[in-house]
Every structure is written in C-alpha cells, then in structure tokens.
Amino acid sequence: MASNHVVTVEHATKRFAGHTAVDDLTMAVPTGGIFGLLGPNGAGKSTTIRMIMNIITPDEGRITVLDHEAASRDLSERIGFLPEERGLYKKMKVLDVLVFLAETKGMGRSTGRRKAGEWLDRLGLADWKAKKVEDLSKGMQQKVQFIGTLLHDPDLLILDEPFSGLDPVNSQVMKDVVVESARRGKTVLFSTHIMEQAERMCDHIVIISRGKLVVNGPLAQVKREFGGRHVALSFTRNKERAAPVLGDRTLIGKVDDYGASAEVELAPGGDPDRLLRSLVQQDVGLSRFEIVEPSLQSIFVSKVGAEAAVAPAQEGHHA
Amino acid sequence: MRKVWAIIRREVVERVRTRAFLISTLLFPLLMAGLVILPGYLMTRSTGTKAIALVDASGDSLGIQVQRAMLAARIGKGDEARAKYTVQRFPAPGRAAELRDSLVAFTALSRKAAQGFDGILMVTDSTVSTGRANYYGANVASFDEMRDLEQTIRPIVIAKRLSSIGVDLGTVTQAVRPLNLETTKVSNGKLTAESGGSTFALAYAMGFILYFALLLFGVQVMTSVIEEKTSRIVEILASSLTPFQMMLGKVVGVGLVALIQLGIWASIAAYFGKNQGKIMAAFGATPGASPAFSLPAMPIKLLLVFFLFFALGFLLYAAAYAAVGAMCSTHQDAQQMQMPVMMFVLAGFFSTFALMRDPNGTAAHVLTFVPMLSPFAVPLRYSIAPLPPLELAGSAVVTLLGMLLVVWVASRIYRIGVLSYGKKATLKDMVRWIRTA
C-alpha cells in the first residue's frame, strides 16, 4: 500500500456471535493530521480500532499499519494506543507504571524514566510520581494513562474515545497535546461520538454506522459535498427588491424567509457568485452574505439517521 | 523478549515489594518453628518428673521391683538427664481399693499440694499372671506417657513370670532387653546416611512443597489475571504484547517469586536444623524432648530431578490457572472455575501417600506417565529408589509435552478470554475459543 497512508483497511469484516460488528469496511488514514472515526455507540468503532491494533483479527479483509500487515505489536514503539476500556495497575507507583508501559513498548528503562519524568512535569503531576496510582484523583489517573500512551513519542496515535469521561480541564489539556502531536507531523486516529469535538479537530473523517462506512473524506470536502449550498442573507433596505432574485428557480432551490434575513438553498447548478452579483444589483443593502457550512452534527444526523445519533449508550463491545 | 522480561520484572518486583510478601515470608517460618518448638516445650513441661503413688497389693517383691525400675527411668540423655518418676510406695495387701480411694483425693490436684500425686499405679497379686495393672491419673490420654509407663513395668512382669518357672534371673535380664530397630536406607547398591524416617520425611516434603506452591502461587497467577481484567489494563498490554507473551511473563514471574520465597524458607529451615539444639535451649525446651527435626541430606541428582519436575509441574498448573483467570471476571466465578484444576492438584498430592507405600507398583509406573500427576510421583519415587534412566527420561518428555499442550490450550483460552468481560465463560465458549484460529 502507498506509504502516504499510515493505516489502510480493505474490506474488513468482523462477526461476533449473533451480529456483524464491522461490515466490509474500507478506509485509509493519510499520514499526518488528525483523523476522526465517528459513529454512534455500537457502530463498530472500537472493533475497527481493535482490528487495526491486531488485538482481534478480522474475519475477512486486510489491514495494514505503517505498511505492515498484522504486526502492530512488533511496531508498538511507533504506535501509541489508548483503548476505550482503560486502566492502570492501581497498586503501582505512578513513575513505575509509566516506566513499565514504556518497556512494553520496547523502550529502555532509563529512557522511559526520563521521558515519564518530563511528561509528568509538563502535565503538572511531578509531585505525584512516587504516589500509588490508586491515591490519585480520577482526572490525574487519566492524565497518567494519557502519558503512558504517548511517552514513547509514537508516529501514530490511536485513541479510542479519548475524551469520554474527562472533565473540561483535562479534556482541554489532552486536546492540546493531540493537536500539538499532529502539528509535529504525527498522525492521530481517534474515535468519538461527540461531533463538536471532531468538527474542531479533524482534518479527515470517516463516519460508520452499524459497521458500514457512511461518509469518508477530508472534513472540508465532506462539508462542501454535503452542503456548500446554503447561503445566509441579511438585508438593510429594499428587501422586497430581493424577491425576484430569490424567486429565480434556476438559482434558488428553497427559501427560508425571516423578513430582514433569509436562508436559501441554492438550486442544483446555482452559483453563489451569481446570487451575490444579482443581489448587489438590486441594491438591497446586503449586510450578510455567508455560505453556510453545515455542522458535522447535522451531516451526521442526516447520514446516520436521527434515531441512531441519539441512540442510548449500548453496553455491547464484544471482544 | 525484552517485553516479556518487562512483564516478568514487574510481577517479581511488585510482588516482592508488598507487605503481604514480607509478612508471609516471616510468618510462615515462625509458624513452622512454633510447630516444632511448642510441642518440645510442652513436652518438657509435661514430662517433668512425675510423682506416682504406687499402691502395692502384690504381696511379694513385685511392688518393690516396679518402684526400683521406675526410679531408674530417666528423661533425656547424659548430663541433662533427670528422674522420670518419684515413687512413693504404699504396701496395701488386702485393702488396696480403699487405699486407692483415699489417695485419689490427693491426685491430679489443680493446685499442686506438696503431698499431691500425678497419678496412682496399682499392682496386685494377679498382675503377673493376668498381665493387668491399673493406673489412675489426669494424664491417661497421653499415649507417650502411658507407653513409657508400660515399657517401664513390662520387663519386670516378664522377668517375674520367667523366673517363676525357674529361668535364671541373669538370663531373664538379658532376654527382656528391648529391641531397637535402627533403619538405614540402601540406595543403588550403596549404604546411605539416611534413616527410614528421614527418607519418608524427604519424600513427603517434596510432594508437600509442590502442592503448597501450586495452591499458593498458582492461585496468585489466577487472581492477578482477574485483576488485570477488572482494572482494564489488559487491553493496553494486549496492544504491545501477544497474549502468549503476557501469559508467559506472568507465569514465569510468579514462579520466580515462588522460588524466592521457598528459597528463603529453605535457608531458614537449614539454619534452624543446624542450630536446633541452641534454639530449643533458648526457648527452655530440652533438646531431646521434641522429635528431632533433621533435614535429610538431598543428593544432587534428586535435587535436579525435583527441580525439573517442580518447574514442569508449576508451569503446567500455572498456565491452567491463568486460563481459568482469563475465563472469569470475578473472584467468585474463579472459585468455581478452578475446581477442575484444583482436583488434579489434590489428586497429585494424595497419590503421594499411596506411592510411599508402594513406590514401584503398577500405580506408580502409570502415574509416572500422566503429565498432571508425574511432577508429584517422579521425585517421590526417585527419592525412595532411583528410576531406570529410560523411565525417568520418558516421564520427563511426556510431562514436558503435556505441559506444552496445557500451555498451548491455556494461551488460546487466555487470548480471547482476557478481553472478554462480563459473564464467565461456559464450557462451550472455551471449546470455541480453543478452536478459533
């Protein structure tokens, strides 16, 4: 597979007793940037990630990670993985846990110790390194867990629901770390069902539902394809003179008229530039002309179905 | 390999560091020492000189002879020997029963009066002919004390009977001298320094150590797998290590902890054995009072056989326990699920008792080739009589293969089970997991 993709999934299918968790999924994670794997609860995000991590094997299809097939464990020093089900050895001291995790990634003990110290300093946990994990607050434990995922400075970060259960402050800290990693040329693949977060962070998204691919592409392109066709307008005068323009069926598909403002959907082939030109000619005192991007949330809802988007949390992550 | 080493290291360091390890390491020898010292101590006190009232209704010299024999009896050996009995004789021809009744009032008093007795021994004119004497006291339940008393009196009675039919007294004295069977083990056509008792102790100890290690540390493997599942760290580990590596690291790590702890205990036992006399004296117990705690010398070959089969057995059972842990999510589930494994451990341990009686019978030869049981059977058989080299090698190979099979099956169960949360696995799940590629 071309090496401009760090992860490729080709026609992957995984069945568990009774249901198909992932169904003929094909996607590719480009090198660099932040890649969002989105979907409602139970869509198959965790199963997909576990297959990528080679913790479970697909029944069908082929998966490569960093150009290798089924070898993510041998590459563990280049991959940082934060599973959805996470935990630490509660009785161990913070620094010891981190050094141990570094070792399991193939790092030397002294390097691991140094890196862990740096990260603990950076996230404000320096005073806690000799404490037992169980003595830390939940938020601190989450930070420690996060450090364990990236202290070996991996090229590829795979985070399963990294922000779930985090308080806003920790959420912010981790977002900063993730964004900074991406800026340094690392690739981040993370799954979430929180669309606002994905919208702000991701360069590229995939939406899956019931194990099937629904949307795949760079975020900007996804939005453009879905709805670069909405324009929000506000008039300051002569608004009745806008009516003929908005009535042009070759240009405008649908109008949502609020009086002094309106939201219109362009007709197929309708050109926003022509709309702007026509309105300026009519001298309607245009105070707002904005091509509105649909929110990821609205894309998600329309693609996956409103019902699935608000589906209650399901217990079902089968291993 | 470095990753496996990280797991082993963590298992050992985190276990050895715990307070529980420290306490059990220190407490166990104390307990054992207590078991050796305490009886010795108690025995020293209870076998202090006994004051006996001898009701002599024999009407001839029997009473006097019994008194003499009892006064001659000694506790301990050499300089430290003390009289076993003080005897006050009450000649009572004809009214023995009344005299006994009046003496009972002075016997086995809770607060010892100056004139009190520990017990009353009654000999009558029919003692020689019927072989019957009576003893009344508080210590009648003590087998040792009653046996001592019997052995003190018996020669007198026998001598009396013999001399009554005209056998010369000197001859009688010669004839009734007790026989003491001293056992020495012959091994491989050579005399050894071991007595029968220490051979038995050694055979028993080896079986016990394996049994003990499996119950204590095998279960630790199981509980720590469950802990990793409940703390959810297992998935993080699973992303960098194969389940087989995880299991290997854990089993070897816990195995090393077992060796460390057993090593410490063995050293303490060796030290104790060497300085037993001094230690006993420090506790105020007479050295000879408790059964000698002697460490039988362990020939190097036997040591090797023991370690080989201990290691094979430990790996086999620890892997099985790891699989059980992987199948469960709670300790309660594990209690039930470990029963099949436990049954093999128990069967192995109890088979040693049967084997000791017949170390070369058919059963012994069969057990030698059952991988689950041979770790118990082979060292025991070897300690009693070395196995033919071919049988030994065959058993080692079969046990090794059995161990690898169990490890293989266990690792397949582990691989899937360790990431399955919730309800415990059924037998059907287990079979499916093993068959899943």
Image: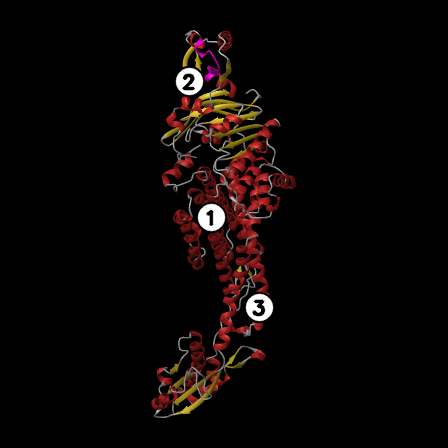
Mark found first going from the N terminus, 3 or 1? 1
Q: Amino acid at mark 1?
A: Thr
Which label is found at residue B276? 3
- Alpha carbon separation for disc pair 3 and 1: 38 Å
Q: Chain of mark 2?
A: A
- Tell me if label 2 and label 1 are in contact, CB under 8 Å: no
Query: From the viewer's perspective, is residue B323 above or below residue B49?
Result: above
Q: Secondary structure at mark 2?
A: loop
Answer few, some or many: residues within 10 Å of disc 1's Cα (few below 14, many 20 plus, some between 14 and 19). Answer: many
The magenta stretch is A224-241
Camera-nearest residue between B216 and A247: A247
Q: Is residue B323 visible?
A: yes
Q: Chain of mark 1?
A: B
Answer few, some or many: residues within 10 Å of disc 3's Cα (few below 14, many 20 plus, some between 14 and 19). Answer: some
Residue at 42% from the left image edge and 56% from the top image edge: B350
Q: Is residue B317 visible?
A: no
Q: Position of residue B58 (x, y in %)?
A: 38, 89
Relative placement, left or right, of B207 versus B299 is left
- Alpha carbon separation for disc pair 2 and 1: 67 Å
- The nearer-to-camera label among 3 and 1 is 1
Q: Quadrant of residue B279?
A: bottom right
Residue at which label 1 appears = B223
Camera-nearest residue between A64 and A149: A149
Camera-nearest residue between A258 and B252: A258
Mark 2 and mark 1, same subunit? no
Q: Amino acid at mark 3?
A: Gln
Query: From the viewer's perspective, is residue B152 above or below residue B254?
Result: below
Relative placement, left or right, of B85 versus B13 is left
Of the 4 image quadrants, the one containing the C terminus of chain B is: top left
